[in-house]
Amino acid sequence: MNLSDVERLVSRAQILSIVDAMSKKLALWYGSVSAGKTVASLFAFLLAVVVAPRTGIIIIAGGSLQTIYQNVFVLFQNTAIFGSVISSQIEYTPGATSARILGREVLLVGAKDAKAVGRIQGATVALAYVDEAALMPEAFWNMLISRLRVDGARLLATMNPASRNHWIRKNWIVPGAAKNLISFHFTMKDNPNLSAEYIADMEASFSGVFYDRMIKGEWTNAEGAVYPMWDPARHVIPFADLPPLRDVMGIGMDYGTTNTTAALMLGITLERKPRMVLMDEWTYNPSEHGDIRLTDSALSSRFRAWLPQDHTPYPLTIRPRFLMLDPAAASMHMQLHQDLRGTGLSPWPAVNDVLPGIKTVANLLGNDQLIATDRCTGWMEEVTEYRWDAKATDNGDDEVVKENDHSLDAGRYITHSTANYWKPQLTAA
């Protein structure tokens, strides 16, 4: 493999990063989605495998063996990128903890939490490749760096940006040369394999802090309002003006005993450009009822009375698909499972990945693909007050202030948990 072979597959920025990476012990690639940073880093890794010290092991680390397979080995087997000669010299069985790359044994380490430190403690590492390094526990990263203790040992890593205060930016990227480290910033324009149409579609898919990170590839603090794009003039319609529906994804429910229990119904409009719509909302807040706390059975009864029934004057002819329930609400899950038996609607544990869920909602709002009717009063009261935790931001973390967010959580549950079902419908028309 020579430079002319590589040049046909990657951009000038990618080639320069591959070459310049050889000058430092640590080399980090970061930037926007689909920027080609992983391809560039893997070419650099292959070159590093060839010259890696024979004393010490070679490691590929990632969040899990599954993500390592998806992000690394699936690419390695793409002969359009790496060629058949290279791909044929990479042997890996999905799920295995070792592979052979260019004749060298390579150990795979899943490092989703601090327990992973024990998997490399005491090892001597000649070469390491880290996938999605910003998601690694800091303790694992520091231990891995300390294991690069033979002459010529190196580490290469890729990541998407996070907060400006993230430990990997503050402690490693910013000091740079002082840590014997070089870093490379990429955007989608550095990937020669992307069409202008794809780039435009991706740019339209993100907004706010997520646009800065995922499109501009910047390390940006999540500060202030979580949904700064919210505008009642854009995002709220009278219930009486609810457009015809093509589908009803279902209902998201956030469960509370001393706090509010909230449920929001999500539909998809039958318009030339379909939109998601938070159609209606049901809540029970003990503080509004003399601090009377209801049993799960009583909450279920009130919730079911709100559900559209054949005899209820309600403009809904399409039955909801899913009931996505707060995954921590085990007792309510059992109650609803019993009470809804035979109705065609049963509770499912919602996907409660907070940051990805917020990203899903923010992108829809930013692209005018999510609206709410004026029946969703809890949602409208909470959305303008929903904010990032400044103290967490100072520590490099993205966390929201957990107060007055019950309707927002319910809306996030049903929207994010059903994304695989509504995404094709938004683009079908």
Image (cartoon, rainbow, N blue to C red):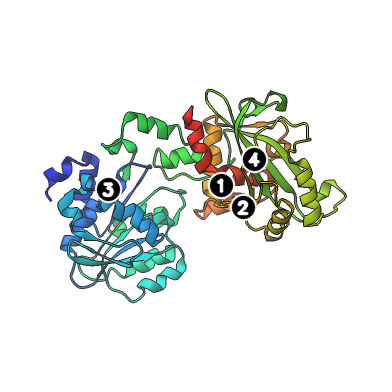
Residue displayed at 67% across by 32% down: 317
Could you tell whether 424 is left or right of 35 in the image? right
Mark 3, Cα crowd under 10 Å, few <14 / some 14-19 / many 20+, is many
Residue displayed at 44% across by 62% down: 112
* In the depicted structure, whether residue 294 falls above or below residue 223: below
| Amino acid identity at mark 3 | Val
Could you tell whether 182 is left or right of 346 in the image? left
Answer with mark 3 or mark 1, whichever residue precedes in sequence: 3
Q: CA distance from mark 2 to mark 1?
A: 10 Å
| Amino acid identity at mark 1 | Ser
Q: Which residue is mark 1?
A: 417
For the residues labelled 2 and 3, say whether their Cβ atoms are less than 8 Å apart.
no
Mark 4 falls on what kind of element?
loop
| Residue 361, position as x, y percentages in the image | 56, 40
Q: Nearer the viewer, mark 2 or mark 3?
A: 2
| Residue 397, position as x, y percentages in the image | 51, 53
Mark 1 falls on what kind of element?
helix
| Amino acid identity at mark 2 | Trp
Is residue 127 visible from the viewing direction of this image? yes
* In the depicted structure, whether residue 151 falls above or below residue 363: below
Q: Nearer the viewer, mark 1 or mark 4?
A: 4
Q: CA distance from mark 3 to mark 1?
A: 31 Å
In the image as oriented, which residue stretches furthest toward the bottom?
Answer: 122
**Front-most of 148 and 268?**
268
Q: Which residue is mark 3?
A: 39
Mark 2, Cα crowd under 10 Å, few <14 / some 14-19 / many 20+, is some
Q: CA distance from mark 2 to mark 3?
A: 38 Å
For residue 195, which quarter of the picture? top left
Q: CA distance from mark 1 to mark 4?
A: 14 Å
Answer with mark 2 or mark 1, whichever residue precedes in sequence: 2
Kindly identify which numbered label has been placed on residue 313: none
Q: Which residue is mark 2?
A: 348
